[in-house]
Amino acid sequence: MVILLALIPAICWGSIGLISGKLGGTSYQQTLGMTVGALLFGIFSMFYFHPQYSLLVWGVGIASGLFWAVGQFQQFQSMKAIGISVTVPVSTGAQLVFQSLAGVILFNEWNTTKTLSMGTIAMVILILGIVLTSLRDNSKRDTSARNYNTGAGVRAIIFSTIGYTLYTVIVELGNVNSKAVILPQSIGMVIGALLFAAGKHPFGKPMAKNVITGLVWGVGNFFMFMSIPAVGLAISYSLAQSGSSSQPSGVSSCLVNAKRVRKWST
């Protein structure tokens, strides 16, 4: 049952690209609309769950939302610099590697020889997949590819990975209630989106329509944090990323914790 809950983010997050693409708008409008939708879901969670808030919850939640905004914005920057086809799989793969490492190093989630050896092998395969995905066929490179800024793209992916990793790790380190952190986190996301979108004319009908995207993202975000205490950060985040058809590395991420998934599902 826990694994089924952990798979809900995969369905929600896997559909975000399709939903936002259908609704349209610039990356700034999509990001801001998405965060507003997440904020509405956070407000709903406050009235529905009646969680206990504290200074720690507010601090951790807002910081987590800001880190998410950094990750999202830098990912968009990388897409502009080196293209979507390279950014998405490399960024997702890097997130999975660092999230898994955080789970192992900070939270001791791979505590047996078997899980450690299998996890290490799977991560090596994942890293190899990232490298192969980032390669380009020079003989078939189109004219637009010559304008790619590899240095800027790599830097953006690094900052994006750091932002996305800290967005989940800080909540786990803070040991705060997953239901209570949703509203503060969404406020941090809106603040971050507004800072990055300043002067980019993010408001308008496309932004309003992308509120739907944020609501879908909020549902997935909620169930990911709900599943972390039961299955761990490494498994929960890997499963959450496995549902996107535009992220090839997401499917291979399930290998990272294959044995442990079977253990929790029995």
Image (cartoon, rainbow, N blue to C red):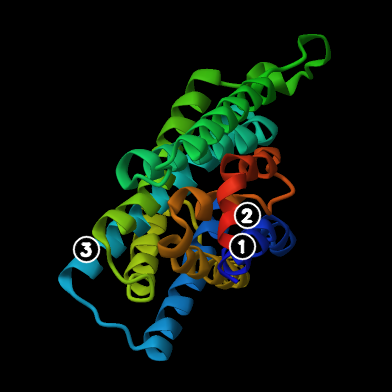
Whether 261 is drawn above or below 58: the answer is above
Closer-to-camera residue (171/6): 6
**Label drawn at residue 262:** 2
Crowding near pointer 3: few (<14 within 10 Å), some, many (20+)?
A: some
Q: Residue at x 33, y 62 (%)?
A: 188
Q: Residue at x 50, y 63 (%)?
A: 224
Q: Is residue 85 visible?
A: yes
Q: Residue furthest right?
A: 140
Q: Nearer the viewer, mark 3 or mark 2?
A: 2
Whether 73 is drawn above or below 47: the answer is above
Q: Secondary structure at mark 1?
A: helix
Closer-to-camera residue (239/170): 239
Q: Secondary structure at mark 3?
A: helix
The tag earlier along the polypeptide, 3 or 1, is: 3
**Looking at the picture, how far across and down is residue 115, in whole percent?**
50, 40
Crowding near pointer 1: few (<14 within 10 Å), some, many (20+)?
A: few
Q: Are marks 2 and 1 in contact (CB under 8 Å)?
A: yes
Q: Is residue 199 visible?
A: no
Q: Residue at x 73, y 58 (%)?
A: 18
Location of mark 1 (residue):
265
Whether 215 is drawn above or below 171: the answer is below
Q: Residue at x 60, y 46 (%)?
A: 259
